[in-house]
Amino acid sequence: MNVPRIVVATRPTALQRVIERHGTPGQARFFLAGRGQSLEDLQRWDAEQESALALVDAAIPLDWRRAYVQRRDLDRFLFEPDDIVVALGQDGLVANLAKYLDGQPVIGVNPSPAAFDGVLVPHAPAQAGPLMRAVAAGAATFEERTMVRAALDDGQQLQALNEVFIGHWSHQSARYRITVGDNVERQSSSGVIAATGTGSTGWARSIHGMRHSGLSLPRPTDPQLVFFVREAFPSRSTGVQIQEGVVSAGQPLTIYSEMDDGGVVFGDGIEQDRVEFPWGARLEVSCASRTLRLARAIPL
């Protein structure tokens, strides 16, 4: 059996980002105090992250390989097919990781349960060791979370765990033609969101609740998506009949751009990692062929 490689993925803590912005802890404290805020919470979360990282590091067997990667370096990191990935941080870190993986199992570890919900990082740091060994031995259970794929007709594509946004990069009016099944409509709107079951607890859920939608949101493992048109504008040439719907294996969502410039597609809220969507381009949105393999529990 090959010696497993554990890849520990993290992101800078809020304290590290604040100090990076202001230069020193003293300057950061002065800045926050002037706005009625405190550095103490940030210091506590930073200490919890360091403690959790030490526990995870100590739990990796000495004869196993190990690697460490920060979120900002994910696009340059080379994952190996047999890697076991430990995501140490908040839920968004798992979404950041998902598009760079191709079947590698992910163990989500929550360093600060009082601060982070832990939907995608449900495990305490002390559980990391037993989970790593269970995954390596083929004894862990997994939740196969559906991902979304957005593919342009020129071959460009992106994948995301939560949702993809299709619209104008500035969030001004986006013009396009949308097709769902036999229904076709030219629209002008604030853009379109297509979300997975995982994403249905975030941006899509907010839209769903705000408009009191009767659409059933999918579960994270369901092989389907939902889409929502944001603030469609009725005019002589644009309609508002297609507002939301389900995207299934047999019924992808197709959108043709009618934007001179500024049309974009991006996933999981990462606007800088986007593909251009110029006039005439065709985009097909569907469930991705791969899933996120999220380790959930150790069988008894």
Image (spheres, grey):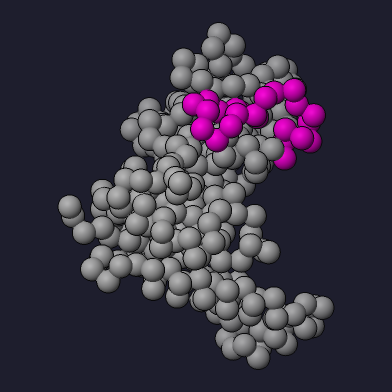
Q: Position of residue 117 (x, y in %)?
A: 64, 55
Q: Position of residue 133 (x, y in %)?
A: 34, 57
- In the image, residue 44 above or below residue 243: below
Q: Nearer the viewer, residue 209 or 66?
A: 66
Residue 285 is one of the magenta-drawn residues = no
Q: Nearer the viewer, residue 194 or 15?
A: 15
Q: Is residue 57 left or right of residue 256?
A: left
Is residue 255 in view from this perspective?
A: no
Residue at 59% x, 49% y is: 119
- In the image, residue 16 above or below residue 206: below
Q: Position of residue 245 (x, y in %)?
A: 63, 21
Residue at 36% x, 52% y is: 134
Residue at 55% x, 8% y is: 182
Is residue 35 in view from this perspective?
A: yes
Q: Position of residue 129 (x, y in %)?
A: 41, 62
Residue 58 lies in what quarter of the image? bottom left
Residue 212 is one of the magenta-drawn residues = yes
Residue at 63% x, 37% y is: 200
Residue 227 lies in what quarter of the image? top right
Residue 44 lies in what quarter of the image? bottom right
- Furthest-front residue in view? 300
- Furthest-left residue in view? 1
- In the image, residue 200 above or below residue 30: above
Report the magenta residues as a range. Answer: 206-228
Q: Is residue 173 left or right of residue 158?
A: right
